[in-house]
Amino acid sequence: EKECGEIEGKIGTLNKEQAAIRHESGELKKQANNLKDRNATIAIAIQEGEADEKRLSSQIVQSPDRVRREMSNATDRLEEERKEVVRIEKEAAQMKSMVGNAGKALKDLSKAT
């Protein structure tokens, strides 16, 4: 009987240890699941961050000097176009004057004859 009592005591102790281990195992599983969820959330955030970086990097000016050159070239072309417009307007005014003079000359000619 003494031996049975000792065995029962050991069994009781082992059952308590098993219950504690089960409880700890359950808590560890919960923590593992929480960590998996957190890991998945972080992975999604990283993917979104990388997508944003890729999208925004295409908007970054890679070479400010190149942009300055392009702007300078565009300004030069605009100035050339303005000069061309002024030249054409002067030509148009001269042509108008010539047409007016020719018309006046025709009238004068028709009066003379």
Image (cartoon, rainbow, N blue to C red):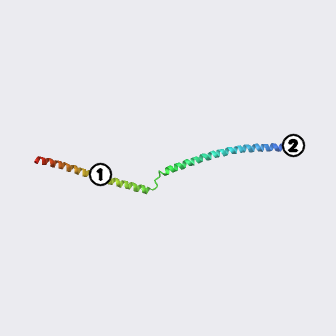
SS at mark 1 in the image: helix
Q: Earlier in the sequence, mark 2 or mark 1?
A: 2
Q: Nearer the viewer, residue 49 or 89?
A: 89
| 3 relative to 68 in the view: left or right | right
Amino acid bearing label 1: Val
Q: Which mark is residue 85?
A: 1
Contact, CB < 8 Å: mark 2 with mark 1?
A: no
Q: State the residue lying farthest toward the front.
A: 113
Residue at 73%, 43% (x, y): give it. Answer: 23
Q: Is residue 113 left or right of residue 35?
A: left
- Residue that badge 2 annotates: 4
Q: Quadrant of residue 65?
A: bottom left
In percent of width and height, residue 8 lies at 84, 42
Q: Within 10 angstroms of label 1, few (less than 14), some, or many (20 or more) residues?
A: few
In the rendered structure, which amino acid carries the disc numbered 2?
Cys
> How many discs appear?
2
Residue 93 percent coordinates (x, y): 23, 50
Tell me how far mark 2 sits from mark 1, CA to CA.
Answer: 116 Å
Q: Nearer the viewer, residue 53 or 9?
A: 53
Quadrant location of the N terminus?
top right
Q: Position of residue 58 (x, y in %)?
A: 48, 51
**Badge 2 local density, few (<14 within 10 Å), some, or many (20+)?**
few
Query: Seen from this angle, which residue lies furthest right?
Result: 1
